[in-house]
Image (cartoon, grey):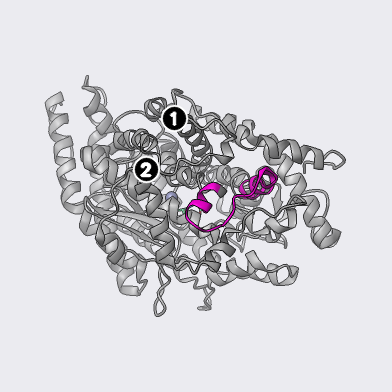
Amino acid sequence: MTFIKSTTSIFVASALTLGLTACGDESATSSKTTSAPVQQKLTAEDAKAFIAKAEKTFAEQYEYAAKVAWVSQTFITEDTQYLEAKSSEELKLIGIEFANGAAKFKDLDLDYDTKRKLDMLRLGLTLPAPADAPDLAAELAQIESKLSAIYGSGEAADGKKYDLIKLSRTLSTSDDPEELLNAWVDWRKVSPAMKDKYVRLVEIANQGAQDLGFKDVGAMWRSKYDMDPDAFAAEMDRVWDQVKPLYDALHCHVRAKLNDKYGDEVAPVQGEIPAHLLGNMWAQTWGNVYDLVAPEGGSGIDVTEKLLENDYTPVKMVEQAESFFTSLGFEPLPETFWTRSMFEKPVDHDAVCHASAWDMSETDYRIKMCIQTTGEEFNVIHHELGHNFYQRAYNQVQPLLYRGSANDGFHEAIGDTVALSITPKYLKEIGLIEQEPDASGDLPFLMRMAMDKVAFLPFGLMVDKWRWQVFSGELKPDQYNEGWWKLREQYQGVKAPVLRTENDFDPGAKYHIPANTPYSRYFLAHILQFQFHRELCNIAGETGPLHRCSIYNNKEVGKKLNAMLEMGTSKPWQDALEAMTGSRDMDATAVIDYFAPLKTWLDEQNANRQCGW
Ligand code: X8Z
Ligand code: ZN
């Protein structure tokens, strides 16, 4: 059972994400465990018994931990944080014991599944605590819980509270540079209170990773991809190089348009783009400033407008998204999904609003979101349901330690893959628009997509580059903020709109840093979803342009997709990718194919501009 975690992540990747999770793929466990038997010579039989014990232990503890985490994340109080930290500490101790126990079998000649499951155990924790140091495990769990609560409640060190949803709305709707700047700065008043805690977290978790034989936590995270950790980092860079020309072209056009709108003072025509002008609190997606960059002659379809015109409520948006999955042949979600999920921001208490999908038991799946009626959120709902359908698919057929996605990028990619089929044709089919635009609508459509999907890529890449540097010690605590902005500038071509210092902790203003959710997964997902989409469209026999293909209603496609979901983590991700696409490599040519007409158009627009930064 994988759920999504936020605060405590215990085991990743496979089975039980006990951690409570947030994004689909961590796992966890609990109860009193046993480590590998202490004896002179361990045998293959011992290894099997050890696995059986781990699966049993996790199965017993998972649901309890999941429920504690759910309550704490949907109702942040002193007490629920206390409970969450306790439960997470317990899980962490068990996770550590199993991870260390698993390492002891590494020199034995074992069958494939035993070996793979031991790897799952060894690599499962997101933030390991040192072995035999329960006080440090407790401290780490408390820090994690506290960081999550600071972010979720938006409470700054001086007790003042900031509302991310409101501030984000300003970022996405205002075109008053001063108002934008204030909202941008305000949200970053919450994170300085995290800094000391984060420094300590790095210290403890690194010790934990070293106890497990990794250089540091970053090296441990990079080891989760069925390949050499350095090769994985190189693979990320290789794929980034494939898409960088497309990003550069988009950046160049957007910067020019922002300059037209705001002038040299606010939005210089050269250099990095000030981060408060791109419609998103982290400048990670730019769709909210689409209107500023729209190709002439068509605005494309504004899904937000259509949802509002058609009186879509949060629940109706979720129902609509579910119906896409059922149109592919998936069973509807259980009744409890509808009664136990959190779809809206609670009015009378704090909750962690960042969207997540949870896997509480084999029959209990939920999402936690504070849904706004926007096209952006409609996509996020598909994203989250992708997690739930993935979880259920592998839970039904895989043993506990294989209950996870092929790699964490796969988990993040499934719902997005489905959402790539939200084409004008599909919107017409579900009655959101009356008429499908002709081919002249393609450029506006592609531009809207690029503002989200292409704009995201360097952000998806740099977040963990920063964390890798932090965990390896390449960045010291007094360089954290500077290092963050260096990467933002280098990869995104985006800069801080006002002077930042080491009194700021801007990484902490992004959910996944206080939540300790690894981020490379989203970069992978943004590549994989196009690869999946291209393949599924092939199966559907669609011969037109990729951006016009919708797999809606296609049961054969659903079957192919389900076959991959059901594999869970039982095989290396390269096998899962091959089963689905025929290729064992990530390949960004699907992104390039998808956006080809837009790239041609952008190059024309940029012909007389000086691009780059
Ligand atoms: O965190 C998420 C999901 C939950 S797994 C809503 N995403 C990343 C983010 O918001 O930063 C989806 C795309 C990137
Ligand atoms: Zn996700």
Q: Residue at x 72, y 46 (%)?
A: 251
The residue positioned 45% from the left and 68% from the top of the image is: 313
> Is residue 84 among what the camera can see?
no
- Of helix, strand and loop, which one carries label 1? helix
Q: Is residue 611 a member of the stretch shown in magenta?
A: no
**Of all residues shown, which one is farthest toward the front?**
435
Q: Is residue 430 magenta?
A: yes
Choose the circle earlier in sequence order: 1 or 2: 2
Instruction: Find residue 111 and report its horizontal and vertical position in percent.
Output: 21, 22
Q: Quadrant of residue 338?
A: bottom left
Residue 279 image point, x, y percent: 65, 60
User: Which segment did they paint magenta?
Assistant: 425-451
Compared to 285, does 609 lie above or below? above
- For the stretch drawn in magenta, the main secondary structure is helix
| Position above or below: 79 against 593 | below
Front-most of residues 488 and 256: 256
Residue 145 visible? The answer is yes
Instruction: Identify the mark at residue 8; answer none if there is no mark.
Output: none
Q: Residues within 10 Å of mark 2 (few under 14, many from 20)?
A: many
Q: Where does residue 91 sit, x and y in percent of width and height?
A: 25, 52
The residue beneath circle 1 is 539
For residue 477, above or below residue 458: below
Seen as rendered, the residue at the extreme top is: 109
Q: Locate residue 202 relative to residue 59 in the image: left or right.
A: right
Disc 2: residue Cβ within 8 A of ligand 2's nearest atom: no
Closest to the observer, 188 or 307: 307
Q: Quadrant of residue 261?
A: bottom right
Q: Residue 292 in the image: state x and y as whole percent.
A: 74, 57
Disc 2 marks a residue whose amino acid type is Leu
Label 2: state its secondary structure. Answer: loop
Residue 328: image tag: 2
